[in-house]
Image (cartoon, coloured by chain):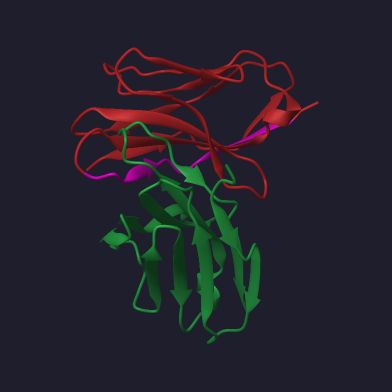
Amino acid sequence: DAGVIQSPRHEVTEMGQEVTLRCKPISGHDYLFWYRQTMMRGLELLIYFNNNVPIDDSGMPEDRFSAKMPNASFSTLKIQPSEPRDSAVYFCASTGSGSYNSPLHFGNGTRLTVT
Amino acid sequence: GNSVTQMEGPVTLSEEAFLTINCTYTATGYPSLFWYVQYPGEGLQLLLKATKADDKGSNKGFEATYRKETTSFHLEKGSVQVSDSAVYFCALRMNSGTYKYIFGTGTRLKVLA
């Protein structure tokens, strides 16, 4: 299994630009999560989907952030316009609903730097 | 609400030393408990898990026992190696309702040769 695949691995952009982060979950997993990791705030859950439907987006910091999951094998996290405080590592993770003790499988993350 | 509290790091040990990283949780029901490890530049990986009271999860020499009476899930290893240097996260997931995972803040471990 290829695991959770995220792209790009690194993104450097200027303030005000649109940024799109991409994720391909593990095939067969019906839950997908987006997390943000910073030194100051640790690991924060932004949003999660079940069967492509957003279930809880209470962690999305503000309207500049949006996430979509058009099908079971693809999700995007978009920031528009980006700001320097958005600099962080963004992780996508997936799991199956077969059991509550099913672990999360994480991608290797996208390191975003907004200058 | 449900929460996870981990000991603050960094923890610095010499090779072959005994490791304990404390984790306690607060939950209104009966969670499954997990330890994840994050190596530099990578995502989190599952290290071990336990699903009910008195279960012991183990992997790669690491162990943790689900203690319901003390609401704890401390991570231990008898003899650490330099390659164990990483950040360790304790997490829980409730066994009903939401599928959200709740993570602790992470504990950085540095093992010196």
Measuring from the top left, give residue A102's x and y in whole percent: 38, 34
The quadrant where residue B87 appears: top right
Residue shown at the point (43%, 48%) measured from the top left = A94
Residue shown at the point (61%, 83%) measured from the top left = A14
Question: Which residue range is magenta in the image?
Answer: B98-111
Residue shown at the point (35%, 31%) measured from the top left = A101
In the depicted view, which residue is nearer to us: A93 or A52?
A52
Measuring from the top left, give residue A114's x and y in whole percent: 59, 76
Measuring from the top left, give residue B66's x and y in whole percent: 36, 19
Measuring from the top left, give residue B21's x and y in whole percent: 51, 26
Up/down of A57 relative to B51, above or below: below
Image colour assigned to chain B: red
Q: Residue furthest bottom?
A: A16
Q: Residue furthest right?
A: B113
Q: Is residue A56 visible?
A: no
| Magenta stretch contains residue B104 | yes
Up/down of A14 relative to A99, above or below: below
Output the letter for the chain in green.
A
Q: Quadrant of the C terminus of chain A?
A: bottom right
| Magenta stretch contains residue B5 | no
Residue shown at the point (51%, 37%) measured from the top left = B8
Up/down of B15 relative to B1, above or below: above
Left or right of B63 in this view: A29 = left
Q: Quadrant of the N terminus of chain A?
A: top right
In the depicted view, which residue is nearer to us: A75 or B69?
A75
Left or right of A75 in this view: B16 = right
Q: Is residue A96 visible?
A: yes
Left or right of B57 in this view: B102 = left
Left or right of B13 in this view: A3 = left
How many labels sit on residues?
Answer: 0
